Amino acid sequence: MTATRRWWDRAIGYLVVAWALHWLPFFLMGRMLFLHHYLPAFIYSTMVAAALFDFLGRAVFAHVPRRGGAAGQAVPVGVWFSAAPSIAYYAVLAGVLAASMWSFWYFSPYSYGSGFATVEQLRAHKWLSTWDLQYA
């Protein structure tokens, strides 16, 4: 077993199992669920995302040569950003930031329980028919 595979199994594998153990019991429930049911699983899914990003830096981009190093060495994520950012970097950053801000604006009335004057407005923001919204 390679060091990369061992790292994947120990770090991300553990986090995925922890996420599943926190999420699956509530997925199987037939009653209404609230935000506090999902928060422990959300913490683990956030850690999985960070570990996956680190894994991509270690495994997928390992062929990229480091400054003063040879190809085939693992590239820490910090090295990716050590050079001057390009226009593409700023474009992607602006896109992600804009998408995050729009998502917050669009979904904040659900989170905070305010902002919808009528039930029709609430239903208009419902993306999936499987979403079970109270009073909608």
Image (cartoon, rainbow, N blue to C red):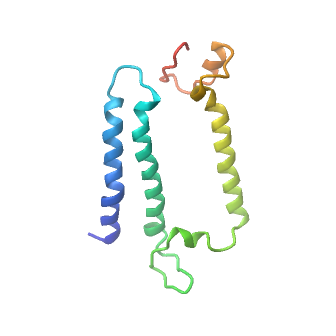
Residue 116 point in image, percent of width and height:
66, 19
Which one is nearer the viewer's eye here, 34 or 67? 34
Q: Residue furthest right?
A: 87
**Quadrant (top left/top right/bottom left/bottom right) for the N terminus:** bottom left
Q: Residue furthest bottom?
A: 68
Residue located 65% across and 74% down the image:
83
Residue located 64% across and 37% down the image:
104
Q: Residue furthest left?
A: 1
Q: Is residue 71 left or right of residue 120?
A: left
- Which quarter of the picture shows residue 67? bottom right
Residue 99 point in image, percent of width and height:
66, 44
Q: Is residue 119 left or right of residue 10?
A: right
Q: Up-down: is 26 above or below 121? A: below
- Which quarter of the picture shows residue 81? bottom right
Q: Up-down: is 126 above or below 54? A: above
Q: How many marks?
A: 0
**Quadrant (top left/top right/bottom left/bottom right) for the C terminus:** top right
Q: Up-down: is 29 above or below 120? A: below
Q: Up-down: is 122 above or below 106? A: above
Residue located 58% across and 24% down the image:
126
Residue 110 point in image, percent of width and height:
58, 26
Residue located 43% across and 63% down the image:
55
Residue 9 point in image, percent of width and height:
30, 59
- Which quarter of the picture shows residue 107? top right
Q: Is residue 107 left or right of residue 71?
A: right
